[in-house]
Amino acid sequence: MSTTVHPVLLNGCWAKSQATTTFQAVNPTTEETLPGVFPVSPWDEIDAMLQIAADTSREMRGWPGSRFADFLEVYANEIEARADLLVETAHAETALPKSPRLKDGELPRTTNQLRQAAQSARTESWRVPTIDTAAGIRSMLGAMGPVVVFGPNNFPYAYNGIAGGDFAAAIAAGNPVIAKGHPCHPETTRIFAEAAVAAIHATGMPSGLVQLIYRTSHEDGVRLVSDHRIGAVGYTGARHTGLKLKAAADGAGKPIYLELSSINPVYMLSGALKERTASIADEFAGSCLMATGQFCTNPGLVVVPTGELGENIIAAVAERFAKASVGTMLAEGVRESFSRGIRTILDAGASLVTGGQPGGGKGISFQNTLLRVSGRQFLANPNVFQTEAFGNGSLFVLAESTAEMVEIAELLEGNLTGSVYTDTAGSDDADYVVIEKALRTKVGRLLNDKMPTGVAVSSAMNHGGPYPATGHSGFTAVGFPASVTRFGMLQSFDAVRPHRLPPVLQNKNPGKVWRRINGDWSQADVT
Amino acid sequence: MSTTVHPVLLNGCWAKSQATTTFQAVNPTTEETLPGVFPVSPWDEIDAMLQIAADTSREMRGWPGSRFADFLEVYANEIEARADLLVETAHAETALPKSPRLKDGELPRTTNQLRQAAQSARTESWRVPTIDTAAGIRSMLGAMGPVVVFGPNNFPYAYNGIAGGDFAAAIAAGNPVIAKGHPCHPETTRIFAEAAVAAIHATGMPSGLVQLIYRTSHEDGVRLVSDHRIGAVGYTGARHTGLKLKAAADGAGKPIYLELSSINPVYMLSGALKERTASIADEFAGSCLMATGQFCTNPGLVVVPTGELGENIIAAVAERFAKASVGTMLAEGVRESFSRGIRTILDAGASLVTGGQPGGGKGISFQNTLLRVSGRQFLANPNVFQTEAFGNGSLFVLAESTAEMVEIAELLEGNLTGSVYTDTAGSDDADYVVIEKALRTKVGRLLNDKMPTGVAVSSAMNHGGPYPATGHSGFTAVGFPASVTRFGMLQSFDAVRPHRLPPVLQNKNPGKVWRRINGDWSQADVT
């Protein structure tokens, strides 16, 4: 082993890894290997972290939300202090544009998430404190135990296992986190860990609050998510790997929150296309090609009417796809997977409108690609035509009738989002009603006249959806306090003596906590 | 096949079953076979129900909660109109006492649950309507799809697949139910179905809202819970069967809410025993022997100090156990399982204090049984000593010290409840703090100076707990609106035009719905 292998973050210390294998990331723009050498952590290392996390979880039982809020806020500051370095590093590791994407978009969004999570922890609003004075029973959500967070390749900040939404939510709920970085951007992840350590020290939190490994074997990943010492798991990434982790966690009775895949259907109705084909084509091309299509909410399936309207929008989008520059993809594996997805859809009978070949941009790239298929073909083979091709491409489906559009919606798998474009005058209203009825239960977030990319960190956001988009349609990975509640266990106190109750359940409201008292929400004391 | 085989409830009609095998229930008191012959439904019958349920679910999309509330309330009335028949029938099928248990306890509790569920549906309070005016995003919980509910043997009313808590919650969330009755009390279940049909007719609900099978093969049960047409599953029953269903549902990405097992630890601290050993012994014996110990919340494990205090409480309980009449058990299978559990604990080194033999009561019975073991023995073999012996028995653990009591708590599996008995003067307070800290995260409901049997239908109730008590520690099977939220999917509306929003998300509050508007709870309109 080289002496330059980066250590792992174990119990607040940068500890030499026991790894016998290592990896290095690749700069997707230059296709050159980056200098940092990172360890593939063996089981013993993970086992040690699990024990530290379990002990830390025990130590923190009953701590007020303000302590976690303090940490999250200082952590956000520490991240901002490292902004330039994070932007340079993430750009080198992911090829995502420095500005506006990394510097002005994703990084502020990430620190905003950490601060919103802090707010949830500080106000204790995520706990759903519930008081039934007649029965003498009170309940709230409490910490669940150590949370393991796996971050994806496509958001080096906002979904990073050590800085993203799942991380923020797990900490806000009072749990230690074992973060597993994504091997595409280990140095970015390492910088976050430096910031986290600084925040731990500054706020006097336990050194086991945040731990980090960069990579492990699939076998040890499975072992990790089914270990008896953990409370829950958050995973964002490829469906194949996610389902393996899900099977393991489910088998051990560990809640696992997943974001697996989504093709984000967009319906463009006749009135809308009559009214504004050009502007819809602009919106669509912008959304579909943004970040080289590497968004979970990328619009990968578009349903339009046959005939002139359908042909016109396809032509307009094709023109924009051909003209637009071709972005660099995150990694060779992403390009291969995209290429395979496109090939699968073509082999099933779709036609190529534009693109379809590797290359066209700097470094790892693939042409902006547009495919088309008839509604009848889609309905004959709905599963194959819903293959996720994660990247800068999309499949248009030309439907003969509103009924066929509805039938397509009824056969959709679960998705994160679904959009419907309608005209402003109301001529699409009747079609909207029947299509919405079918589409609504297939998607977590329904949009009107808006593309699905761009996930606001809103209390009403649902970044989630029915299986296989996620593992449970009741939960969202983005938005506060809803995302925090995922990492809490329901704790009921029955006839527990008043002075022994947690502060948020005592008669006197410890702050301005919203509590459900005898069925009504209130910030008042119990009288 | 005999012509007297009871039909199944398919799409609102009593349809002749295609069953090739049948079963009959047994009267546990007389040990005689009861006359009703019931079908073991084959897959084709279940498949037909699934299609009807899926169609019904589609038909009901977007319906207001008031329609489901009307049904639930009329159903409660229809049940009350059949009270005498239900009491006679359930007594014959389960041996549970007619009064107070069935007539004055469980039946009113069941209709109360249905009415509380109706209230949740009518006020839409379970939907957690959330409005973010700045982001233009609004969200709520909506129906999830057909729910399959498996009822257990021990509550022929309150947890019945066609009348109990999971049923009420699933309907309140706007979902059709396929109920699977328990084979121990099919005639009771049939009477509920008659009442449900009457309520469906009276309220003009779709005939596919409630369907019923009495029994099916294990293989078809697995197929049922993993069918793509269902939304979720509720199961209360034995761990072994529940885990098979869980694996199948998890694999298909279907949420499954389980109640599997619990031994409900009770800690009796020194001060409490010094103060009131006799009254604690009364409480304990009453709780442990109630309904012949066949409660999910039956106190099966008691931790007491060694020495005189521990010996005295054991002697006092033993005396009460020996004097108390021995109840009749629900079924031969329950007695066998209880006997097996007792044997396992004895074989692991526990001592028999009293009881331990089959018989002693009318019909199917087993002596009131008390076992004891040292804390050291328990700690050396914690899993075996946590074997659930479901019935009129309990295991006392004699701990050397407070530290040993804490260590025992840290090794407990997930349970529904945990109780701590302390003295009134405060001498147990220091011990309480350390024991509570360990016990709190192992149980869904923590009690002080109160036995765990008796589960109030309260908004703050948690009838749930960490795995393996249930499948997810964030959910409760009892209490409104929390139990209803389990059967809802999160639906976010992003930039959806105002007139297209569901009524509860429009600016004008359609009633007095509690909504979270820009972070604060309110019953007002959005201004």
Image (cartoon, coloured by chain):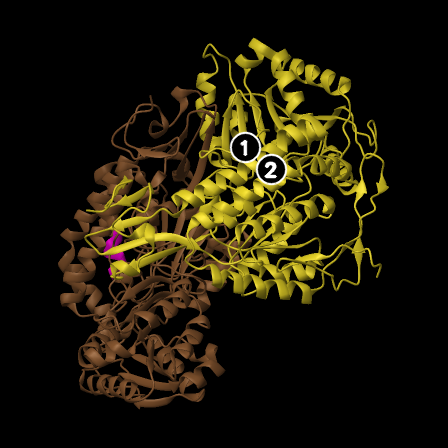
Chain colours: A brown, B yellow
Quadrant of the rendering where the C terminus of chain A is positioned:
top left
* A57 vs A510, nearest the viewer: A510
Please tell me which of labels 2 and 1 falls first in the chain: 2
Q: Are marks 2 and 1 in contact (CB under 8 Å)?
A: yes
Say whether residue B274 is left or right of residue A322.
right
Q: Does residue B333 lie above or below A463 as drawn?
A: above
**Residue B523, image quadrant:** top left
Predominant secondary structure, magenta span: helix
> Circle 2 sits on which residue?
B262
Question: Looking at numbered disc 1 in the image, what kind of residue is underneath it?
Answer: Thr
Quadrant of the rendering where the N terminus of chain A is positioned:
bottom left
* A39 vs A114, nearest the viewer: A114
> Circle 1 sits on which residue?
B417
The answer to whether residue A81 is seen in the rendering is: yes
- The chain containing the residue under callout 1 comes to B
Q: Report the residue at 70% width, 38% height from top.
A: B86
**Residue A102, image quadrant:** bottom left
| Image: magenta residue range | A188-193
Instruction: Rate crowding at label 2 as few (under 14), some (14 to 19) or many (20 or more) other CA atoms within 10 Å.
Output: many
Query: Where in the figure is residue B405, as x and y percent of width and height?
Result: 54, 26
